[in-house]
Amino acid sequence: MVPMPTSRRGGSRRPQRQQPPATPQIDVHDPDGIRLQKVLAQAGLGSRRACEELIAAARVEVDGQIVTELGVRVDPTKAVVRVDGMRVQLDPTKITLAVNKPIGMVSTMSDPDGRPTLTDLVADRSERLFHVGRLDADSEGLLLLTNDGELGNRLAHPRYEIAKTYRVQIEGPEFYPRVGKQLTDGVELEDGVARMDSVRVVDAVPGRTMLEVVLHSGRNRVVRRMLEEVGYPVTRLVRTRIGPIALGDLKSGRTRVLGRTELGTLMRAVDL
């Protein structure tokens, strides 16, 4: 038998672990593009000098590749740029708004019956916006308007299961925990079983309870129908959150442009 080679300490020498091959570097430089630090500055990441420091600190990623060279140029209409892992919207023509829809307004951009529409809230804007999701006319709260087709399509797609949060006022007897469990286990509706992710009592007085409910389903009037099915008619419904975007203190009938961080977290939620 051939003896195993030994180390200087007299023990058996272990075979060297083979290192995996390094990930090939991707050339993200576009000679006809714009300097990366200028693109970042135009997107609101700070002064050009501050953006150069972000690049030098290896905090900027282009098309999945960390970039540390200040001479890199990119096409802002094609490149996917992230800072600290968060997507940056580079196209200044794209915009996403949070809207606090009031009661009585329909969740459309036009209405043949002449009812108030979301267009009334953005009449001063030149962008051609469309709404993401709906709220019935008797409900109020957060809606999103955007001209970013890719973002809008992903937010509406069931694959990404964006959670929505509501404050709901109900009438009826005391709301026992078993009713909440029934709602999270699933309620049979005419269009199939629907489930809430969570149900929490926020406030209660005799005959009236305020709930906070979270669910992913985008079915028509699903919150109202579920609660009515278990014996608690809804007297007020306010959507307070869509994924990471909160209604906050936005007043009824008002809009606001999503900030860079808000937009980045929203894009992350749908894998953009």
Image: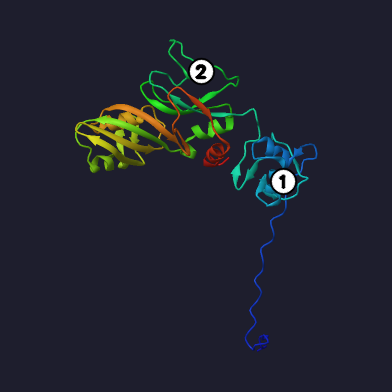
Residue 189 in sight: no
The answer to which quarter of the image holds residue 136 is top left
207 with respect to 105 (left or right) = left
Kindly identify the residue that appears in the image at 37 percent across and 29 percent down: 238
Where's the N terminus, which quadrant?
bottom right
Residue type pointed to by label 1: Glu
Picture disc at residue 192? none
Can residue 21 be seen here? Answer: yes
- The image quadrant of residue 248 is top left
Q: Residues within 10 Å of mark 2 (few under 14, many from 20)?
A: some
Q: Position of residue 220 (x, y in %)?
A: 38, 27
Q: With 150 as the anchor, is 167 left or right in this view?
A: left
Q: Residue drawn at (73%, 49%), measured in percent from left and top? A: 26
Q: Which mark is residue 52?
A: 1
Q: Secondary structure at mark 1?
A: helix
Q: Quadrant of the C terminus?
A: top right
Q: Quadrant of residue 2?
A: bottom right
Residue 119 - label: 2
Q: Is residue 231 above or below residue 176?
A: above
